[in-house]
Image (spheres, helix red, strand yellow):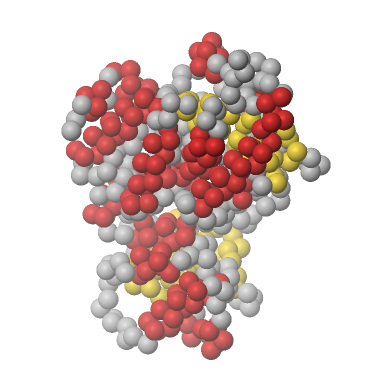
Amino acid sequence: MKRGPVVAIVGAGPAGFYVAEALLQSLPDAQIHMFERTAAPHGLVRYGVAPDHQKLKQVAAVFEGIAGHERFRLYAGVDVGRDLGLSELRARSHAVVLTTGAALGRPLGVPGESLPQVFSSAAFVGWYNGHADHAGLQPDLTADSAVIVGNGNVALDVCRLMVRAFDDLAASDIPQPMLEAFRLRGIREVHLLGRSAPGAVKFTFKEFRQLSDLPNVRIRLPQAADFTPAMWEQSSSPDAKRVLQWLRAEQGRPVDAADDRLTVNLWFNVAPTAFVGEPTLQEVRVRSSSGDAFAIRAGIAVTCVGYACRPIAEAPGCDAAGVMRHRAGQVLDDDGDEEAGLFVAGWAKRGPTGIIGTNRACGYETAATLVATLPALMDAAPTLASDFGALLDARGIVRLGHADWQRLDAHEKDRGAALGKPREKLLSLDEALHVLSTGRAVACESAP
């Protein structure tokens, strides 16, 4: 009897789960094997969504439903490219789908970017969300002035967390070691540097209002006197137009000299030219589009200027935009030819754009492309057996299945409840294995 298709998905974030959902629906005999290098699934939902946006994380319940399917297997804690080669996956599967995201921060390419206290958004966001790659970052938030480079939603997330009241942060899922750094913060002023015009902001009006509505924060435009009538009117999107309207209305309000709220300064048409300090960051040098140069005193800086794919051994490289070459999710080699049986979805496919839900359409497109090529892929049966568990066991590679994650999930929520927060995250694979080996998470399973 001919077996059904075996599909391996690399990456357990939203894109990976939506690909799995589409394949489970359209291929009634398919076996889906999902590999995740961290101890926990859910990717961007767990490690990218801001900790004070808990409602957005509720989509994890959808992923849990997919993971519980009888034809789905999770292998967390397994690094494809290190523990298991991509060529080995391809030899044991009819198709492989890469949904590894864009985990690396793009550099600005200016002097001083490697100074202590200068961080990429990938590192800083990963740190406050408890990602194992960045849990040991230890940024010092005691400085009274910070610079954030960028004018997208990620920049606004970072800015909001830097100024939000501590009690709000304490009720989020920021892990306790990171929360302690926020408790000690001394930040009184944040400078948000936008390299484009005020009417070309990339953040949404909704995200902007979540910052501007904070009762302990005031928004300032240091360049307001230089705005021309045209600058107030020109906008690249409905969101940018609404932001400009809000800013223009606020300019007419009187300034109270006794106002001691934290200040967020919005700068436009400016770009950093250097990060300066010895031995750590002390100022950010900036140049405007008109050629004016000045310096902003700062003890910490976060650059939110984009993300790039994390390379996987044996996988084709990314193009100049930092995404994998593909045609509707079918991976292409450097010559533009199809890599038979190799597909891509999510940020690795389209770049770091869109919202969580964008990954559903993206994943479904890739799944449809895979299904369309499946007859030819089925004719070329895997050359090796698809018993990934036995292969990993033979190598001594510990893997965590969905049942293991359910125990860890219950354990994190139990710890969080004791602290008055949604969960208290485990910060490494070693911590997860320790919890599972000691059985401390077992008691949580029987809790009501």
The mark total stands at: 0
**Which part of the image, by quadrant, shows the N terminus?**
top right
Question: Can residue 381 be seen?
Answer: yes
Residue 126 position within the rendered picture, expressed as x and y whole percent measured from the top left: 45, 44
Q: Residue furthest top?
A: 394
Residue 194 position within the rendered picture, expressed as x and y whole percent measured from the top left: 53, 68
**Which part of the image, by quadrant, shows the C terminus?**
top left
Q: Is residue 398 left or right of residue 250?
A: right
Q: Residue furthest right?
A: 335
In depth, the one of 236 and 403 nearer the eye is 403
Residue 184 position within the rendered picture, expressed as x and y whole percent measured from the top left: 29, 51
Residue 25 position within the rendered picture, expressed as x and y whole percent measured from the top left: 50, 37
In depth, the one of 16 and 422 nearer the eye is 16
Q: At 48% from the left edge and 86% from the top edge, which residue is drawn?
A: 225
Q: At 54% from the left edge and 27% from the top edge, which residue is drawn?
A: 29
Rendering quarter of residue 341: top right
In depth, the one of 254 and 146 nearer the eye is 254
In depth, the one of 33 and 146 nearer the eye is 33
Q: Is residue 340 left or right of residue 303?
A: right
Q: Is residue 264 left or right of residue 118?
A: left
Q: Is residue 60 above or below residue 304?
A: above
Q: At 42% from the left edge and 57% from the top edge, which residue is drawn?
A: 157
Question: Can residue 85 be seen?
Answer: no
Q: At 61% from the left edge and 50% from the top edge, which residue is drawn?
A: 350
Q: Residue furthest front?
A: 1
